Amino acid sequence: MLLENILKPTEFAREGMIIRDVMKICVAEGVPALPYVNGKGERRGFISLSSIMHHGCLPNYMVDLAMVLGNHLNCVKDARGKIRELMDHPIEPYISKPLRSITSETPIIKAMAILEKYHSSFLYVFDGDDYRGVVTAQGIAQRMLEIDAETP
């Protein structure tokens, strides 16, 4: 199996973007994160939807107590207003490191092993300085289903 069959080309998240911009790209492209480059075009990490949601929406105590929280929470007033406010935040505080990447020559089984090692659902594909896109666990699963459906 070749990475080309499951690669999702995306653009970079760039310095000066806001949360709304990143969310629109991730949702449109069906990816959980984007690589981030600064104003000089240097790779400096990535921004993920889970990081935005965790750090932008959830107080740490809610994460720590997630399994014992009830279904009727009144601790967030004006949730719609808070969401709209979050959408205008700059992305820089939400950037994570390191930027884990593979090349387009990496065997899919190795990509799967790296995903598992880092408890991640995505990897970036770079051939030198050439950014090719994102490989996701969901993309690998989809390709596995396609292979399974092929006539032997």
Image: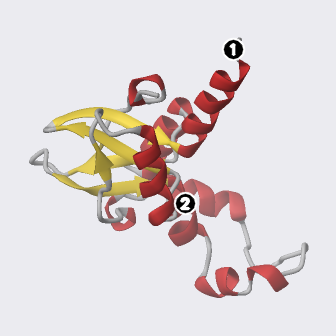
From the viewer's perspective, is residue 92 above or below residue 72?
above
Q: Residue at x 72, y 19 (%)?
A: 149
For mark 2, give the secondary structure: helix
Q: Position of residue 20 (x, y in %)?
A: 48, 45
From the viewer's perspective, is residue 11 above or below residue 151?
below
Image side of residue 20 versus residue 59, left or right:
left
Q: Which residue is mark 2?
A: 50
For mark 1, give the secondary structure: loop
What's the distance in space between the residues labelled 2 and 1, CA to CA? 39 Å
- Total labels: the figure holds 2
Can residue 17 be seen here? The reply is: no
Classify the position of the C terminus by image quarter: top right
Q: How is the image coloured?
A: secondary structure
Q: Which residue is mark 1?
A: 152
- Marks 2 and 1, the one that precedes in the sequence: 2
The one nearer the camera, 49 or 84, is 49
Q: Position of residue 40 (x, y in %)?
A: 9, 48
Give the residue type that dot 2 points to. Answer: Ser
